[in-house]
Image: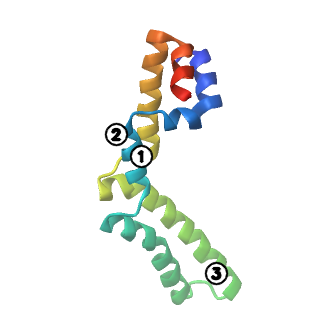
């Protein structure tokens, strides 16, 4: 994408996201909510993994065991974030925002920055 558009996108990203088509906005909002069983499962999984790791006492020292469980919880959180599109059937927020960006880039190509300014207000 052209540098001019990229700079404009970085500067006005928040206001452009609010001016995006309603269907993309609604999909983005639904993607962030905990409204399916899979969402709740992936939200609670890191806590369950941390508690299970703490109960097993793999490390003799209490403090090291706690720190290791935090590390395991962080890994479990990252894995749940990676698995979310496959478990819930929702698209990632980054993919939806890329579609929004492509929508505005199409407007930029046809009508220029003035059209984007008019949409923002």
Residue at numbered disc 3: 66
The front one of 27 and 47 is 27
Q: Give the residue displayed 46% in from the left and 24% down from the top.
A: 104
Residue underneath mark 2: 23
Q: Is residue 114 above or below residue 82?
A: above
Question: Which of the two marks, 2 or 3, is nearer to us in this view?
Answer: 2
Residue that sits furthest to the front in the current view = 121
Residue 36 on image: x %, y %: 32, 64
The C terminus is located in which quarter? top right
Per the image, label 1 sits on a secondary structure element best described as helix
Q: Position of residue 83 (x, y in %)?
A: 38, 57
- Relative to 35, is 107 on the left or the right? right
Label 2 vs label 3: CA separation?
44 Å
| Label 2 or label 1, whichever comes before in sequence order | 2
Foreground mark, 3 or 1, reads 1
- Residue 117, above or below 48: above
Give 56 or 96, whichever is nearer the viewer: 96
- Mark 3 or mark 1, earlier in chain: 1
- Few, some or many residues within 10 Å of mark 3 (<14, 14–19, 20+): some
Disc on res. 68: none
Query: Does residue 34 appear to the left or right of 113 in the view shown?
Result: left
Q: Which sits earlier in the primary sequence, circle 2 or circle 3?
A: 2
Q: Nearer the viewer, residue 99 or 48?
A: 99
Q: Which mark is in front, 2 or 1?
A: 2
Measuring 52% from the left and 78% from the top, which residue is drawn there? 50
Q: Which residue is mark 1?
A: 28
- Give the percent coordinates (x, y) of residue 77: 50, 64
Judge the density around disc 1: few (<14), some (14-19), many (≥20) Cα neighbours within 10 Å: many
């Amino acid at each position: 994408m052209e540098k001019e558009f990229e700079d404009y996108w970085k500067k006005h990203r928040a206001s452009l996201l609010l001016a995006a088509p309603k269907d993309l906005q609604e999909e983005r909002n639904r993607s962030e909510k905990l409204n399916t069983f899979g969402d709740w499962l992936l939200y609670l999984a890191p806590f369950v993994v941390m508690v299970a790791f703490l109960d097993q006492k793999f490390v003799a020292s209490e403090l090291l065991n706690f720190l290791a469980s935090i590390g395991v919880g962080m890994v479990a959180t990252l894995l749940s974030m990676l698995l979310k599109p496959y478990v819930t059937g929702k698209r990632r927020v980054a993919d939806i925002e890329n579609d929004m960006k492509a929508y505005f880039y199409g407007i930029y190509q046809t009508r220029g920055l003035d059209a984007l300014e008019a949409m923002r207000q």
